[in-house]
């Protein structure tokens, strides 16, 4: 399975201010990234992973066969990614095959 983890601008209710779309361009669909992940642990210590109203962490599985992924600003205002520790990480799992001529 392939995964996407992203920390992006969110509103005070923890709703993302961007939408993730996936597919094979130009045929794209919205990816459900769920709700903000608020808390986690590192070496047994608690971590705050989201700061509602500023930046929130989300995680989702990417469907098989996807070749294109994009972030779309679905709001009516410009978003700033200069502060807040924003990032997107995509992990792809696959199988290597031998190509024979």
Image: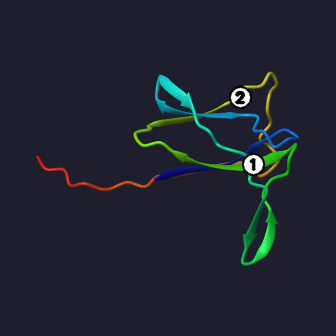
- Residue furthest left as drawn: 101
Residue located at (47% from left, 24% from top): 27
Q: Secondary structure at mark 2?
A: loop
Q: Tell me where residue 21 sits by quadrant.
A: top right
Whole-percent x, y for residue 55 in the image: 80, 47
Identify the disc placed on residue 73: 2
Q: Relative to 46, say whether 1 is above or below.
A: above
Q: Is residue 49 left or right of residue 96?
A: right
Residue nearest the observer in this picture, 10 or 70: 10
Do residues under tags 2 and 1 come within 8 Å of each other at their CB atoms?
A: no
Residue density around tag 2, few if under 14, some if 14–19, many if 20 or more, within 10 Å: some
Residue density around tag 1, few if under 14, some if 14–19, many if 20 or more, within 10 Å: many
Name the residue that disc number 1 marks: 36
Q: Nearer the viewer, mark 2 or mark 1?
A: 1
Residue located at (88% from left, 43% from top): 53
Whole-percent x, y for residue 62 in the image: 51, 44
Q: Is residue 40 left or right of residue 70?
A: right
Spatial CA span between label 2 and label 1:
17 Å
Q: Secondary structure at mark 1?
A: loop
Residue located at (20% from left, 55% from top): 98
Task: Tell me which label, 2 or 1, sits earlier in the chain.
Answer: 1
Whole-percent x, y for residue 25 in the image: 46, 26
Q: Tell me where residue 32 sits by quadrant.
A: top right
Identify the disc placed on residue 56: none
């Amino acid at each position: 399975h392939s995964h996407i983890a992203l920390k992006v601008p969110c509103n005070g209710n923890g709703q993302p201010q961007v939408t993730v779309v996936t597919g094979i361009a130009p045929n794209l669909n919205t990816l459900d990234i769920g709700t903000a992940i608020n808390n986690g642990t590192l070496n047994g210590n608690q971590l705050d992973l989201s700061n509602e109203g500023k930046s929130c962490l989300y995680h989702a599985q990417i469907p098989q066969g996807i070749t294109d992924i994009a972030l779309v600003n679905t709001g009516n205002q410009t978003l700033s990614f200069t502060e807040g520790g924003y990032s997107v990480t995509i992990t792809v799992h696959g199988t290597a095959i031998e190509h024979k001529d």
